[in-house]
Image: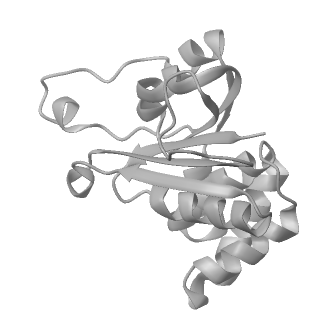
Amino acid sequence: MNKNILICGVGGQGTVLASKIIAASAMIEGSAVHSAETIGMAQRGGSVVTYVRYGEKVAEPIVEEGQADVLIAFERLEALRYAHFLKKDGVIIVNDQRIDPMPVVTGVAKYPDGIIEKLSKKYRVVSVDAMDEAIKMGNSRVFNVIILGIAAKNMDFPKEQWIEVIKKTVPPKTIDINVAAFEKGYELA
């Protein structure tokens, strides 16, 4: 059975790292894996989307609308923007964080209110303030790995396998904090 994962966020939040960890975990299992990223204006705080598809036979990397089993959103407006990619019985893992896009910063648009509440009316949503959890751990940069730990409960790999992949993927001096962040997210799930 194939699994479709869509990861969305804002440039610099670590969506590409998260997709690499998911893809590597799937490859260990012997799954066929395809991944792709759409980064656009990421360096200017723009939207970033990465796709990971794995399973017995995967023909292409792009997850189509209505096909994502798991949508991992590192920012709540991005969750709203990409929710239509989720399949009927899928789950949204969302970091309850607000990052104003340029139209909001310049006053051209207004940031929507009640995003998580709106999403929860239509989808199964797991929401966490991962940035707050990461700050409590002493490193705000690991919030994405906390989210990944939560999302891992909705994927097919054992916890130990995730941890091994994280150890091989993150810079050596950040291994301990990233493993702790993953375990925190796994515990929160």
Residue at position x 49%, y 29% from top?
A: 64
Which corner quadrant of the image does residue 92 belong to? top right
Q: Position of residue 137 (x, y in %)?
A: 66, 67
Between 126 and 6, the one nearer to me in the picture: 6
Q: Position of residue 76 (x, y in %)?
A: 48, 33
Task: Identify the image quadrant of the N terminus.
Answer: top right
Q: Position of residue 114 (x, y in %)?
A: 49, 17
Q: Is residue 6 left or right of residue 186?
A: left
Task: Identify the image quadrant of the C terminus.
Answer: top right
Between 34 and 111, the one nearer to me in the picture: 34
Q: Name above or below for residue 53 compared with residue 136.
A: above
Between 125 and 136, the one nearer to me in the picture: 125
Q: Name above or below for residue 34 compared with residue 118.
A: below
Q: Is residue 114 visible?
A: yes
Which corner quadrant of the image does residue 25 belong to? bottom right
Residue at position x 58%, y 90% from top?
A: 173
Residue at position x 55%, y 54% from top?
A: 34
Q: Position of residue 31 (x, y in %)?
A: 73, 58
Q: Is residue 146 visible?
A: no
Between 67 and 32, the one nearer to me in the picture: 32
Q: Residue furthest top?
A: 121
Which corner quadrant of the image does residue 123 belong to? top right
Q: Is residue 93 left or right of residue 140?
A: right
Residue at position x 30%, y 37% from top?
A: 100
Q: Name above or below for residue 163 compared with residue 35.
A: below
Q: Residue furthest bottom?
A: 173
Colour pattern of the rendering: one colour
